[in-house]
Each structure stands twice: as C-alpha cells, then as structure tokens.
Image (tube, rainbow, N blue to C red):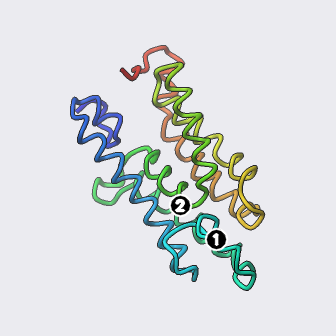
Amino acid sequence: MGSGNIGATNVARTGSKGLAVATLLLDALKGYAAVSFAFWLAGTRQLQSPVATGFYDHPEQVMNSHSIFLLAALAALCAILGHMFTVWLRFKGGKGVATAVGAFAALAPRAILIALVLFVVVVAVTRYVSLGSMVAAASFPFLVWWLSPAEGTSTPILLLIAASSTLIVVRHKDNIRRLLAGTENRFR
C-alpha cells in the first residue's frame, strides 16, 4: 500500500498508526540489538555503549575500546544494510532510518539525540519526513566526531558511520527527486 515501502512512515500513511509505531520500534530495536550484541561480544559484557555504562572508568579496558567501537560501528552498518536489502523481500527493503536510529542510539547516544532534534525541527518546519531523515542522517557523522570520546572517532569508525549515513541518504533518491519537483508528500 502507499509507496510500497516497508517503513513506519508509509505504514502510518496507510492509516494504521499503531502498526506504524510498532514498525518504528521494532526496526529501531533491531539496530540497537545488533550494536549492543557487538559491544557484548567484544568483551564489555554490557548490552550498551561503553560510554553509557561507565566503561571508561576501568583503565585496563580502555586499550581495547577502539576495537570495540569499530566492531560496533560495523554491526550498525550491517544491521542497516540488512534492513535495506533484506533477504526475505528479495533484497528490497526499507530506507534504514529507524534501524539506524536504534543502532546509533547504542553506538553514540548523545549524537543521536541531537540528530533526532534536528529531525524534529526539519519535519516541524517543512512537514517532510524524508527531508528530516536525510538531514539527521547527514549530520550524524559530524555529531559523532564532535561529541564522542576519542576512542569512538577514529577514521575507520567515522568512515563506517559515514557509510551508514550515506546509504540512508542514497536510499532516499526518489524522495529527493520528488522534493526537487515539488511533489513529495507532506506528513500530516
């Protein structure tokens, strides 16, 4: 129905607000779970970001933090790719926004909060969810660089985060065309 997209925005447009909220939460949870599992697997034994858990209070663990963040950023990218190109839908899927929000919330919680504020402001002003999503995604790598500890902002980690953000913007190519043509649907 609607645009045929599996994302929460399209589900909301089809009239099922409850199902749209469930879609949003489950997609976000999928991204959060992937990154949290990567942190756990890498040795923090916590299902949260090292920043959020006080990981840096233990100096003996700081040596491994770069590798842990790298693994978590890779898990975020993989979760987003898995959502965008899901096997169950013949490698067609969503745009990855909600999955990225969950993954990035586990990876860089302060940066995602500011990205979400940007999203809300852009949508409130323009009524375009797609534009808000792209602005938030495009700003996220810069926010991580600005707000995260040095261990989470090495070039490889930022490249993985930037790749995730770029994929989200690229998946909005049809929305970009409609925005430029003035035919994009506004959120009500």
Residue holding disc 1: 54
Please identify the quarter of the rendering in which residue 152 is found.
bottom right
Tell me, yes or no, whether the two marked residues, 2 and 1, touch with CB atoms within 8 Å.
Answer: no
Residue 106 has which mark? 2
When the figure is inspected, residue 35 is found, relative to residue 21, above or below; the finding is below
How far across and how far down the image is residue 123, in percent?
A: 50, 26
Residue visible at 55% across and 47% down? 167
Between residue 138 and residue 101, name the one nearer to us.
101
Residue visible at 58% across and 42% down? 137
Gap in angstroms between the C-alphas marked 2 and 1: 14 Å
| Label 1 Cα crowd, 10 Å radius (few <14 / some 14-19 / many 20+) | few
What secondary structure is found at the residue carrying circle 1? loop
How far across and how far down the image is residue 113, in percent?
A: 58, 45
Between residue 25 and residue 55, name the one nearer to us.
55
When the figure is inspected, residue 145 is found, relative to residue 118, above or below; the finding is below
Q: Which of marks 2 and 1 is in front?
A: 1
Between residue 127 and residue 110, name the one nearer to us.
110
When the figure is inspected, residue 141 is found, relative to residue 155, above or below; the finding is above
How far across and how far down the image is residue 114, in percent?
A: 62, 42
Residue 42 has which mark? none
